[in-house]
Image: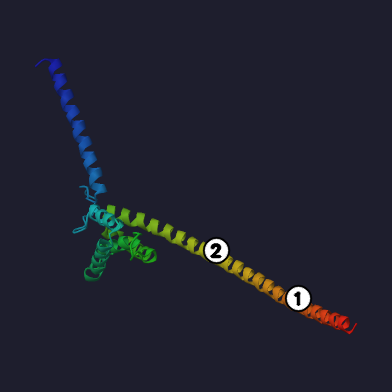
Amino acid sequence: MDKCSRKKQLQRIAAMGVILAMVGGCTQTSDWLKGRRTAKPSDTIILGAPEADSYLKELSDLAGGDPARQAEIYADAESGVVLTPGPNTELRFALVLATPGHAESDAEKAQSMLREVLAQSQLLTPAEISLATIHLNNVERLIVANAEARRLRQSNSRAATTEERAVSQRLASVEAENRRLRLELEAAEDKLEAITSIERSIREQE
């Protein structure tokens, strides 16, 4: 084999090596996003830990808006915490509580549970830790937004109550003034009637 052919063969082998390395890197990235552990010696293997896909699929169904499916997911997640308590089932239930748009959504309870789950991060996969952190940040922002909304509603309610009270006071004042005017009108009419009666009597006498 001449030098030119050997050079071309080596170039093809090098190119194949680069491609394989890139594919391996993409696979590792995909595995991390899906919650699968990479084969690093320093990694701790969490036996029985669910993949991130299972959490995301359930949260997608939960946000879908089907009340029957929402109730089924909530009941299953709640029973999981009761029957097999642990960071994985607690995370699942906390994520269900943290998802808005269904009847059992509870941001405050989700916040508390997610904090407890993250305190046991050594028992979670990196994907689970990421999910817990992201949803904890979301529920904390949601709690602040809900508090602000309540404050604005209360402020508007107080303003409306104040305005209603002022309107009521103005109406009461107008009604009192109308009553006074009616009494004065009636008194004037009585006086006019008396004067008219006297004038009539005088004319009759004449």
Q: Amino acid at mark 2?
A: Asn
Residue at (45, 61) in percent of width and height: 146
Tell me which numbered mark, 1 or 2, is placed earlier along the sequence.
Answer: 2
Q: Where is residue 111 shown, x and y percent of the image?
A: 38, 63
The circle drawn on residue 83 is none
The one nearer the camera, 156 or 133, is 156
Side (left or right) of 95 relative to 144: left
Horizontally, residue 48 falls left or right of residue 199, namely left
Asked whether the residues under the numbered discs 1 and 2 touch, taking CB atoms below 8 Å apart as contact, a structural biologist would say no
User: 92 or 173, which is in the foreground?
Assistant: 173
Q: Which mark is residue 156?
A: 2
> Regarding mark 1 in the picture, which secondary structure is present there?
helix
Local crowd at mark 2 within 10 Å, few (<14), some, or many (≥20)? Answer: few
Q: CA distance from mark 1 to mark 2?
A: 42 Å
Task: Classify residue 185 by image quadrant.
Answer: bottom right
Judge left or right: residue 137 versus residue 39. Answer: right
Residue 3 place in picture, x, y as percent: 14, 16
Q: Looking at this view, name the residue that lies furthest to the right.
A: 206
> Depth check: 89 or 153 in front?
153
Give the amino acid at mark 1: Leu
SS at mark 2 in the image: helix
Residue 185's mark?
1
Residue 114, image quadrant:
bottom left
Q: Is residue 16 above or below residue 176?
A: above
Q: Quadrant of residue 16?
A: top left
The foreground one among 104 and 47 is 104
In the rendered image, residue 131, in percent from the top left (x then y), is placed at 31, 55
The quarter of the image holding the C terminus is: bottom right
The reply, left or right, for residue 20 in relation to residue 153 is left
How was the colour assigned to the protein in this rendering? rainbow
